[in-house]
Image (cartoon, helix red, strand yellow):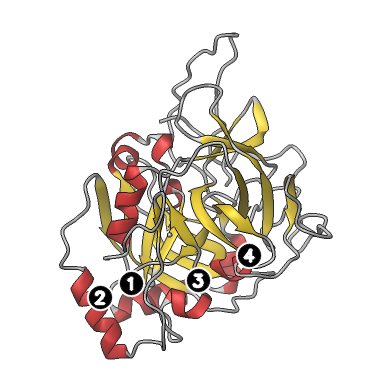
């Protein structure tokens, strides 16, 4: 497991694309309980490690009470925690070292409430980092994640995806579990976060899922997690904010839009920021990840990458999440390729 720069969702339709849950009026409380009882009787998916979070009403209330506005404001951008460097030499002699947790920009801490980026006049097809000023579904389905590891509070990014149980969030593995180390506590998802506002409420984690290669080895090629969240008083996550499609085994090298809430300078974590461009492979051949030119900083970990994205509607297909940057190329973000293992995670989460 190599330390990284802290950057700190059914049946197949086509080419690995996973379809939406049934649509219609919001389910009643009894219906929701029936869904939960039924999906938990399913056998676990292969290669998936799961963890039970806040299942009882008392646990959910405790987590919601924990996240005061003050705690959210002071939460630190998350990266790989307690990582031990494994440095290999490149052909040219450069070290593919990835920076450790809490490495900060030399620009110094950003002032809270500062402008996080110059707003883009219109969504660009190629940008390394700009404020998302258009509307659309992505403004509802993307949000911030708040969680605790040890005695420290952290923040990541994540996205809501359409699922059978209507409750699945996709994010980075290190935003849920510290590789071979501990699971996070007090895990919550705030969709549509903007400037401290929580327009669609807060969703607590019910169950968390990571891949065995991440849990056992901290394998960066599998730095992805799926979380089944509890319904809020307004309903299931997909009922409240909708959800993006999620795809697996998609063609490599496609164009994508990456979204998140970077919190290190020049950003402040308060607004939705995006990158967009063509994807390419890992030039160091250390992972199966794909890279994209992107200036997003700590706090953007776990933010969704959407292919086939329509800026007019804010809809696309989630095919990766923000994971890490190499220290010799801080202008490129890498995200895990969603293959069979990511599909197994999603299958488990939408039953969880």
**Residue, disc 1:** 165
**Residue, disc 3:** 67
Q: Distance between the residues labelled 2 and 4?
A: 29 Å
Q: Are marks 2 and 1 in contact (CB under 8 Å)?
A: yes
Residue 314 circle label: 4
Q: How far apart are marks 1 and 4 (CA)?
A: 22 Å
Asked whether residue 134 is in view, the answer is yes
Q: Which of marks 2 and 4 is in front?
A: 4
Q: In this view, does 117 lie to the left or right of 199?
A: right
Q: Do the residues labelled 1 and 4 touch (CB within 8 Å)?
A: no
The secondary structure type at the circle numbered 4 is loop
Taking the spot 44% from the left edge, 46% from the top edge, the residue there is 174
**Residue, disc 2:** 36
Q: Which of marks 2 and 4 is nearer the N terminus?
A: 2
Taking the spot 38% from the left edge, 67% from the top edge, the residue there is 163
Q: How far apart are marks 2 and 3 (CA)?
A: 25 Å
Q: Which of marks 2 and 1 is in front?
A: 1
Q: Which of marks 2 and 1 is nearer the N terminus?
A: 2
Q: Nearer the viewer, mark 1 or mark 3?
A: 1
């Amino acid at each position: 497991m190599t330390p990284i720069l802290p950057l700190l969702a059914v049946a197949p339709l086509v080419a690995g694309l996973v379809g939406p849950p049934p649509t219609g009026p919001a389910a009643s409380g009894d219906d929701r309980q029936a869904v939960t009882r039924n999906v938990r009787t399913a056998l676990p998916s292969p290669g998936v490690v799961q963890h039970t979070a806040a299942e009882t009403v008392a646990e959910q209330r405790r987590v919601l009470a924990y996240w005061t506005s003050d705690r959210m404001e002071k939460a630190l951008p998350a990266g790989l925690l307690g990582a031990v460097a494994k440095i290999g030499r490149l052909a040219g002699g450069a070290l593919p070292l990835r920076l450790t947790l809490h490495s900060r920009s030399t620009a110094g801490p950003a002032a809270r409430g500062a402008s996080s980026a110059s707003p883009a006049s219109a969504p660009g097809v190629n940008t390394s980092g700009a404020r998302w000023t258009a509307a659309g579904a992505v403004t509802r389905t993307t949000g911030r994640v708040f969680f605790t590891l040890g005695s420290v509070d952290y923040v990541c990014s994540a996205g809501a995806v359409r699922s059978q149980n209507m409750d699945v969030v996709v994010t980075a593995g290190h935003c849920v579990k510290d590789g071979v180390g501990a699971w996070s506590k007090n895990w919550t998802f705030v969709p549509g976060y903007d400037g401290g506002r929580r327009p669609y409420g807060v969703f607590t984690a019910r169950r968390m899922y990571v891949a065995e290669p991440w849990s056992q080895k901290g394998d960066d090629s599998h730095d992805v997690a799926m979380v089944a969240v509890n319904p809020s008083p307004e309903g299931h996550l997909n009922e409240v904010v909708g959800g993006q499609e999620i795809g697996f085994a998609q063609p490599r090298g496609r164009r994508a839009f990456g979204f998140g809430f970077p919190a290190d300078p020049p950003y402040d974590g308060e607004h939705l920021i995006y990158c967009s461009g063509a994807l390419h492979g890992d030039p160091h051949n250390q992972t199966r990840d794909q890279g994209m030119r992107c200036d997003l900083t700590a706090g953007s970990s776990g933010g969704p990458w959407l292919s086939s994205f329509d800026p007019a509607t804010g809809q696309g297909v989630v095919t990766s999440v923000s994971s890490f940057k190499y220290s010799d190329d801080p202008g490129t973000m890498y995200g895990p390729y969603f293959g069979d293992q990511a599909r197994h995670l999603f299958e488990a989460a939408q039953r969880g």
